[in-house]
Image (cartoon, coloured by chain):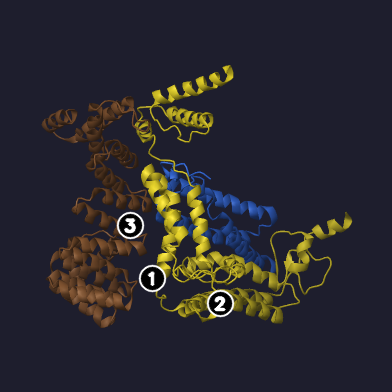
Amino acid sequence: MVNAAKVLQDLRASAERKPDVVVRLGKPLVENGAVKKLDADAWLVYEQVAIAALDVGDDALAQRCIQALEQKFPGSARVRRLHGMKLEAEGELIQAGEIYKAILQEDETNILAAKRQVMLLRAMGLPSDAISALVKYLDINYTDFEGWLQLADLYLEQLMYSQAAFCMEEVIMLQPQNHIFHLKYAEILYSQQSIGLALKQFCRVVELCKDHVRGLYGIKLCTSHLLKLSPSKDSTATSQEDLKAIDLLATERLIATYNAASSSTKSVSTKWIENL
Amino acid sequence: MGAWTVLQERQAMLLDPAIRDWVLLPIMLVMVLVGVVRHQVTVLLNGPPRKADLKSARETKGLQRGSILRAHGNHLPEYAFEARKAYLTEAFEKGTYLKDPKAGNKPKGNVMQDPAYVETMMDGMKKNMMNIVPQTVIMGWINFFFSGFVLIKLPFPLTIRFKSMLQRGIETQDMDVSWVSSLSWYFLNLFGLQSVFTLILGSGHAADAMRDMQAMSTMGMGPAAGPQMSPTGQPQDMHKIFLSEKENIELTEHEWGLNNVETRLLVKYGKLPRSILVDQKKAKAAATSVSGPSTSSLSSSSPAAVAAAAAAAGGKKKGRRQA
Amino acid sequence: MSGQQINPDDALYVDMFIAKNSQTMTFIRSSYSAILGIAAGTLGLTNWSGFIFYFTGSAFLSFLIFAIKAKARPSLYFRQPLDVFTEGVLGGLLSYILFWTLLYGIIHVYD
């Protein structure tokens, strides 16, 4: 029992989305009432399990958790948001929208409700409305990098690459140490055909996270593309010498990643990488 | 010389253990308890977190945009940085993020009527009261009950100048400065118990004397959610702050961190020697100092180009001398 | 006046972890300083020997943390590798003096 609580606590701290783990560990806790022994943490666990249950599709479990929370905190905006999420899961999108609107009318700074509203619009198939709602939200809450990330995704769905790149730039400024965001930015740049810039970003990814395979592949693609073009006169572009050196490095590291594989895989992958 | 030697002799005095039981330990105990109680009372007084005002939050976050751009802008390519720089300087100038764009300079008479400002002032005052009152009360208590006798000997010597401060109430001439009164024991506890409180109450406890001293000098700094107050308690002119932030941004130059990322990557994997980076830095510094008015700094990254640039810089110098 | 030079390794430090490490260091040092103070008072150390005792003990603790906890690579855990040795020493000194005075008084000054 103690271990389950610790795992749930760690998941809350790291904000990872692992609904199957949470439900597997949390369901017995909720069903046999052991969760109450956790005192203050019990309510956090209820909330966590409720959201995970909705993810997994276990509506009954979610309902139990929400009811317990409602008993303890009647009228709380946080609980009402959970209720809205459950309605969303059941497909009652209009009703969920009403709940969020009511919460926001009472307290216009309620972040949870604002965010759910944006995602609701997306679920209802109104991407442009979702985008404008999210832009309005981010105008106020500039430092919410998850919001910027979500906006980038919304733009990418609409194939609006330059706007998505703008969002990723904001995310990078807010979280410069995270190589995943640099990676996403690099891939957007590549899709926009700014190959030179994309190459530099991919290099940054590998610099932040040594031997990052996706970054190395990105480097390979960029260098093979750039080497086919005539040398650019632009002084900010990578020189031919550097291009060749980086290309060699990427090839070498990529082949090294398949070192542990069987020999047939190794030879196939080596051949393919070298021909990239 | 002789008087000095007399003072240096270890003055062996023995004190009544009753002093220890009824003064030394009680003072320490009282201070610990008061600190804990003060922490709990502050938590109670603060009550539920205040509802944040949308416009105020937007104002503070808007200001943060500037500082974040300055701090991390070097991760972005030049065009991205310049675009944001231009947008923010214009926005700060126009006051797009201000809570009340038409406020201008509010006449001071209206301050008391604005409920948000009153709340912030009350908060600041509450905090100060919670810090000052216990200190004053305990000091008064000690001075009233425990003055006029020696309490304890400090294990280390001090200069004569401390004598008047530490032995207040005991007017002797020859006693070692190390023998101190109850008040100095109070001060010793005040500073020494800081870390003990951090141990018991966790960080951010309300009994932090360092924060007291800061609070006494800068009154009324409310949490970020409320409207900002300047140290003198006047409502701050956000417009001026935005303008100064705008100037900071204008002054910030963009130094793209990814200029030589390929070289750095090659060095990291050991394909190139680390000295290349040092050479590049030197060449860049030389190039920018020689090329003077032409603002574009040398951004080429390959070693060959760097060597060529260094040669060119040398050639330029030669040309000047010859001409 | 110009923008900061981007130090490629700077972005590798996560603020939250640095703060947590700093907190842990302060915690260890304050508890340790209190105990050192009690020891010094009991032993009856005075004047310089008392301060030398503190700084030696503090250096010993730093060395232990450096070797065992930081695994001899403090740059992994702190922005400046020397922080392992200097973080929280002065705060610890104040509690050391308090407990040193207290125990010294109780044992050596009173009857």
The residue carrying pointer 2 sits among few (fewer than 14), some (14 to 19) or many (20 or more) residues within 10 Å by Cα, namely some
Q: Which type of secondary structure does the marked residue at label 3 adopt?
A: helix
Visual hue assigned to chain B: yellow
What label sits on residue A145 in the rendered view? 3
Mark 1 → mark 3, Cα distance in angstroms: 19 Å
For the residues tagged 2 and 1, is the chain the same? yes
Three-letter amino acid code at the position of disc 3 = Phe
Q: Is residue B118 left or right of residue B5?
A: left
Q: Which residue is mark 1?
A: B54
Q: Is residue A138 left or right of residue C55?
A: left
Which chain's colour is blue? C
Height in image: B145 above or below A248?
Answer: below
Q: Chain of mark 2?
A: B
x%, y% of residue A117? 24, 68
Give the camera-side residue of A95 and B2: A95
Q: Which residue is mark 2?
A: B125
Is any atom of residue B55 visible in this view?
yes
The residue carrying pointer 3 sits among few (fewer than 14), some (14 to 19) or many (20 or more) residues within 10 Å by Cα, namely some
